[in-house]
Image: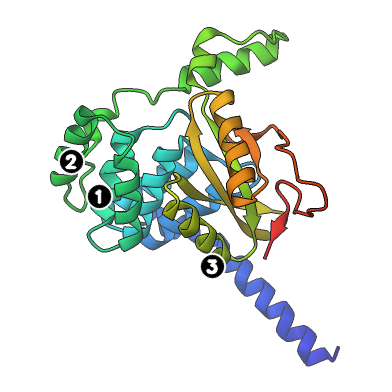
Amino acid sequence: MTWPSLRALTFAAVFLALAGCALNPRAMLGSADAQYRLGMKFLVTTPPDYEKAEYWLRRAAIQGDTQAQKQLGRFYALGFGGQPDFVRAYLWLQVAAVLDAEAEYDRQLLARGMTKAQLTEAEALAAAYQPGHAPDEQLEAKPRAGARDRKEKSKQEATGSGKPTSTQNRDKRYFVKLGVFASRENAEALRARLIAQGESIALQPIRQGDRDLVAVRAGPYSSPAAARRALRRFDRELHIQGQVTVQGVGSAIKSGVPKGESRPKPGQTKR
């Protein structure tokens, strides 16, 4: 490699590093785009920092950033950092759906699993949204379900107690991870195919090393048995071998592969 080429590469690396460092001050100064990008950065780090991701995505969403509103809705729907909050999820997806067709699709899908009371509350909150105002501000006094359980779990780990509490068992949510893709287009294609089959499917951005990947997962399911049934259905009807996860923590359960048939291992990155 010639010296000019090496110097150009060094300059590019320094520029990208400085651009990444600039996100935080720009976000603190009120840039909705920087706040959204910073929130997504915390969401895809290993391990993810859900508290900071939620904080920055909310700040951008409140300012009117459509992408932040959509991602925040998915954040609450999937229960990142706690138990799923369908009212908040529906609220932000509906606000984003004004300008984003994908958010509208997610909103309709989410509505299928909500009660009439939840839908009424979420729609009223969405109707009250104005840029610069958090329509779910009155909900902030109510801690998101799962926060107390995480503290109890940390306390148990610190004391060496492995016995879960009944509250922890009740708040667990189970998913089926169907694959990890390097190409978001391919992940979207699988998602669209499965949604057409009536499945509840979401995309989850993850980071492995220096690569940004997209995981496709189905759920949530209320019990391990329900997740296993879905896992077997995906294998039997769609020839997709997946993996059961609990609140994002992998717990592989093989579904059985017909003899003579070769498939990717669960969690294997696909193009």
In this view, 160 is above or below 44: above
User: Which mark identifies residue 47?
Assistant: none
Which residue is at a point 51% across and 17% down the rendered structure image?
149
| 152 with respect to 54 (left or right) | right
- Residue 211 occupies quadrant: bottom right
In this view, 161 is above or below 86: above
Q: Which residue is mark 3?
A: 185
Dividing the image into 4 quarters, which one contains the N terminus?
Answer: bottom right
State the image coordinates of residue 79 (x, y, percent, origin top left). 46, 34
Q: CA distance from mark 3 to mark 2?
A: 31 Å
Which residue is at a point 44% across and 52% down the rendered structure image?
195
In this view, 267 is above or below 116: below
Q: Does any portion of residue 31 appear in the rendered image?
A: no
| 64 with respect to 168 (left or right) | left
Dividing the image into 4 quarters, which one contains the C terminus?
Answer: bottom right
- At label 2, counting other C-alpha atoms closer than 10 Å, the crowd grade (few under 14, some 14-19, many 20 or more) is some
User: Which mark identifies residue 123?
Assistant: 2
**Colour mode of the rendering:** rainbow
Q: Which residue is mark 1?
A: 94
Which residue is at a point 39% across and 62% down the rendered structure image?
33
Instruction: Give the camera-side residue of 46 and 244.
Output: 244
Mark 2 or mark 1, which is nearer the start of the sequence?
Answer: 1
Q: Which residue type carries mark 1?
A: Gln
Instruction: Give the camera-side residue of 87 and 64.
Output: 87
Q: Is there a contact, CB below 8 Å, between mark 1 and mark 2?
A: yes
Secondary structure type for disc 3: helix
- At label 3, counting other C-alpha atoms closer than 10 Å, the crowd grade (few under 14, some 14-19, many 20 or more) is few
